[in-house]
Structures are given as C-alpha cells and as structure tokens.
Image (spheres, rainbow, N blue to C red):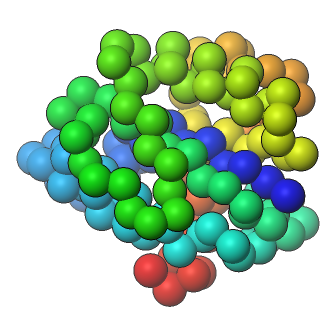
Amino acid sequence: MTTVLVDVANVVGSRPDGWWRDRAGATGQLLDRLAGLVGTAPAGPHGDPVPVVALVAVVEGRARDVPAPDGVRVVRAEGSGDDTLAALARDLADGADDLLVVTADRGLRDRLPATARVTGPGWLLAAADDTGR
C-alpha cells in the first residue's frame, strides 16, 4: 500500500503549458487530476503496480489557497515548500508501508528519508492520464 507525496509546484512547473499565468488555477487542475489516482494501482516507475491508498500534495505560495478535492490531503506550506515536504516525508515514512515521493528537485531528493522511493513528474502525469481524469 503506497502513500504518494507530491511536490505540486515541481509537477506543475514540469510542463511549459502557461501555468505561470495562473499558478493557483494550474494547481487546482492538477489536484483534480490526481484525485482519480486514489484507490487505483497504476504501473509504477519500474513497471510494478503501485496501489495508491493515499495522496498527499504539498502546495505553496500563490497556490496555497486552492481547494482540496475529495480524496487528496493538501498540506499548505507556510514557508518553504521543500522544507515542508522534507519534514512531511520523514513523518510519513514512519507510518506508511511504502512512500513514493514525486519531485524532480535533486536538492529535495537528497533531504528525503532513505526508505522513500522517488520518481519524477512524468510518471505521475502519465498515471493520472491513465485514470481518465
């Protein structure tokens, strides 16, 4: 059973689709797409099924006030999103059977617990597309 922890700013920023004109709107659209992953078992980064039992999304800056869709736990970073995500990953790694963190941020990856698996935004976006959202 996998908890997926998402660096939302990093995922939103991974595609040059105009997100910078409306960060909050782009974040809301992404969260709506991700809600469809909870309760599914998409193929993981290495092809193995990832049974998603929880999805936790860290939002920051102008996107902090976006509403949380059903099924997604939204954590609103008061300061640095990376600091919030690293601390949350440590907390979640203690209680999750499997923690999969989604970020392409190399500096953040170095701050994650050794037990956390890490993948980039491409996997998450493809998995969300496969759920039909």
Q: Relative to residue 92, is residue 30 depicted above or below?
A: below
Q: Residue at x 18, y 33 (%)?
A: 62
Percent coordinates x, y for residue 54 in the rendering: 66, 55
Q: Residue at x 72, y 24 (%)?
A: 91
* Numbered label tally: 0
Left or right: 53, with 115 as reference point: left
Specify the quadrant that holds the N terminus. Answer: bottom right
Specify the quadrant that holds the C terminus. Answer: bottom left
Q: Nearer the viewer, residue 38 or 10?
A: 38
On the question of residue 16 being in view, the answer is: no
Q: Relative to residue 72, is residue 90 depicted above or below?
A: above
Left or right: 35, with 21 as reference point: right
Left or right: 67, with 54 as reference point: left
Percent coordinates x, y for residue 110 in the rendering: 70, 16
Q: Quadrant of residue 31 in the image? A: bottom left
Q: Nearer the viewer, residue 123 or 81?
A: 81
Q: Residue at x 38, y 24 (%)?
A: 77
Looking at this rendering, what residue extends furthest in the bottom direction? Answer: 132
Left or right: 90, with 66 as reference point: right
On the question of residue 72 being in view, the answer is: yes
Percent coordinates x, y for residue 131 in the rendering: 57, 81
Looking at this rendering, what residue extends furthest in the left direction? Answer: 21
Q: Quadrant of residue 119 in the image? A: top right
Percent coordinates x, y for residue 44 in the rendering: 79, 62
Q: Relative to residue 66, is residue 39 depicted above or below?
A: below
Q: Residue at x 13, y 48 (%)?
A: 22
